[in-house]
Amino acid sequence: MDLQSVARDGGAFQQPVTSGHIRRICRRVFGRDAVSAVELGWGRYNTTYRVAVAGLERPVVLRFAPEPARQFASERELMRNEYATVPYLSVIAPLMPRVIAADWSHELIGRDYLVQTFLDGVPAPERLPGYPRASWTSFYRRLGEITRTVHDVRGPAFGPVANAAYATWSQAVTASLSEISADLEGAGLDAADVRRAAALAADRHELLDEIIEPRLLTGDLWTVNTMLAPDAPEPTITGVFDLDRTWWGDPAADWTIRLASAKQDERVAFWEAYGPADRAAAALWRSLVYEIRHLGAVRLERHRHGDAAGVRTSYAEVAAVLAELT
């Protein structure tokens, strides 16, 4: 079979697989051989291929999680978390890829993998710049509608969907900050600032525990995880994917909300569809805690991809938020 992989150095976090792995998986799942596989450069965590299978009219997507030893504790088994979320994402099922097969056995390869249907369209980062900026409002408005639909889904407890283990929101937030801190320290980085935020969250738990109903958070929904119709007169979302960082909690803690709030540009249309943000004092305090959690996770990602300058910058970013939090 023809295999095309993204060129990376041997120390890169995302690691390719062999043609043998792909062929064996296709034989197991479809009873047929793979004809070709092209690694897609989307995302910075899983390794993803578009695979043509003998006898199938359409290609499929084959996604591989990192090897278990390469995963941070705060990002443990994200693919399994995504799989556990599929029933709750039925509210946006027409936009989602369907799961054809999931395998956590590590019999064919020492990594979790998913086989999914291939979404039509063009990745938004490639297609959106081709539209006049004035038309981007339709994209953000629709993104607000999708996010609102997901956030309206109610869950059983707080925490990652596959392991909703916390009775209170403060416990889930504190645990997440502590896990990120431990990962940072395990990577040889200073995490005192993130640990300080965890302590503050525990001390002021009553403010976090005003959130009493777990809602579904997308974890990572933004332009990079959306597909657009290639020839529509205005940006039209045809699909969303890679929702592996879902968890149950306060919608205001979602990465999508952070990015929607980041600039006063075309993305203000997001709020027209989503609804206004809570500007109460307690909500603003919580948003500072969430921002440090985001920045801690970003620091980990920058370290993982060798961005030393970005790691250094993150300390000043967290310090500025801590100053407001205290």
Image: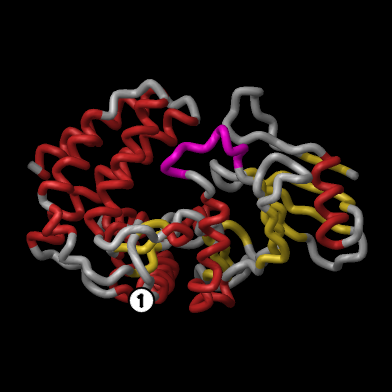
**Residue drawn at (17%, 48%) of the image:** 201
Asked whether residue 277 is in view, the answer is yes
Inspect the image, locate mark 1, and give the three-letter code of the amino acid beneath it: Asp
**Residue drawn at (86%, 48%) of the image:** 23
- Quadrant containing the C terminus is top left
Q: Residue 81 at x, y = what percent?
A: 51, 57
Q: Residue 305 at x, y = what percent?
A: 50, 30
Q: Quadrant of residue 172?
A: bottom left
Q: Is residue 145 above or below residue 218?
A: below
What residue sits right under mark 1 in the picture? 152
SS class of the residue under badge 1? loop
81 left or right, relative to 230? left
**Residue drawn at (40%, 34%) of the image:** 300
Camera-nearest residue between 175 and 226: 175
**128 magenta-colored:** no
Colour theme:
secondary structure
Asked whether residue 130 is in view, the answer is no
Q: Residue 31 at x, y = what percent?
A: 90, 61
**Residue drawn at (25%, 57%) of the image:** 264
290 left or right, relative to 150? left
Crowd band around label 1 with a 10 angstrom C-alpha radius: few (<14), some (14–19), many (20+): some
Q: Quadrant of residue 246?
A: bottom left
272 left or right, relative to 31? left
**71 magenta-colored:** yes
Residue range in magenta is 66-75
Q: Quadrant of residue 271?
A: bottom left
Prevailing secondary structure of the magenta residues: helix
- Quadrant containing the N terminus is top right
